[in-house]
Amino acid sequence: MTDLLAIAPWLETLRDTSAVIVAMGAAVVSVSTAAKVPFISRPIRYVGRKLFAEPLEAVFDRWVDKHLSNLTATVDTTAAQVAEIDGRVAGLDGRLESIEHEVLPNNGSSLRDAVSRTESRCDRIDAELTRLLPLYAPRPQA
C-alpha cells in the first residue's frame, strides 16, 4: 500500500520543473506589471539603455566606420551595373518591338501577313491542282 502512495522519481522531477517554470512566469508578469509604475520603469529603462542599447550602438557604429568604405564601393559598383543593365534592356526593348511588328499580323505589312498570303496562295494552287490533275492524267489504253 505504501508503494501506491509513493511518487515516482520522474514525477518529482516534473513537479519541481513545473514549479520553477511557474515561478519564472510569475516573476515576468510581476516585473512587467511593476514596470508600468514610473518610479520602477525609469530605472529599468536607464539600466537597459546603459547595459544594452549604448554598448550595442557603439559596436554597430564601430562596425559601420570600419566597413563603410567597402559598403560604399559595393553600392557604387552595383549602381553602375544596374545602370548598364537598364541601358541594355532599353535597347532590347526597342528591338523586341520591331520583331513583334514583323511577327504579328498588322493589315498586310508584316512578315506574318506575307507568310499568310503565301500559305493561302499555296492552298489555292493545291486545290486547283487536285481538281485539274484527274482531267489531264493519262488514261490507260485498251
Image (spheres, rainbow, N blue to C red):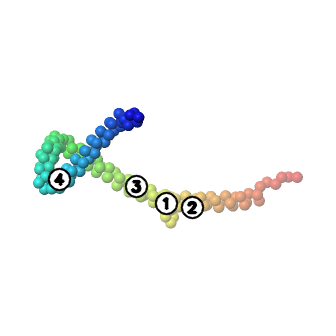
The disc, 3 or 4, on the residue closer to the chain's N-terminal end is 4
Task: Give left or right: position of 6 versus 69.
Answer: right
* Rendering coords of residue 22 (x, y %): 28, 45
> Is the residue 20 above or below the residue 106 in the image?
above
Mark sitting on residue 104: 1
Residue lying at 38% horizontally and 57% vertically, measured from the top left:
94
Q: CA distance from mark 3 to mark 4?
A: 66 Å
Indicate the amino acid at tag 2.
Answer: Arg
**Front-most of 17 and 82?**
17
Question: Percent position (x, y) of residue 45?
Answer: 14, 50
Residue 78 located left or right of residue 103:
left
C-alpha span from label 4 to label 2: 85 Å
Q: Which mark is residue 117?
A: 2
Picture coordinates of residue 32, whole percent (x, y): 21, 52
Tag in front: 1 or 4:
4
Image point 52% across, 59% down: which residue? 112
Q: Closer to the camera, 60 or 100?
A: 60
Q: Nearer the viewer, mark 2 or mark 1?
A: 1
**Mark 1–mark 4 CB contact (< 8 Å):** no
Q: Kindly report the distance in space between the C-alpha atoms of the residues bearing marks 1 and 3.
A: 14 Å
Residue assigned mark 4 = 35
Of badges 3 and 4, nearer the viewer stands 4
Q: Please tell me which of labels 2 and 3 falls first in the chain.
A: 3
Residue displayed at 29% across by 49% down: 82
Q: Could you tell me the amino acid type at mark 4? A: Ala
Q: Nearer the viewer, mark 4 or mark 2?
A: 4
* SS at mark 2 in the image: helix
Dot 1 crowding, Cα within 10 Å, few <14, some 14–19, many 20+: few
C-alpha distance separating marks 1 and 4: 71 Å
User: What crowding class fits label 4: few (fewer than 14 Cα within 10 Å), some (14-19), or many (20 or more)?
Assistant: some
Residue neighbourhood size for the residue with mark 2, other residues' Cα within 10 Å, grouped as few (<14), some (14–19), many (≥20): few
Of helix, strand and loop, which one carries label 1? loop
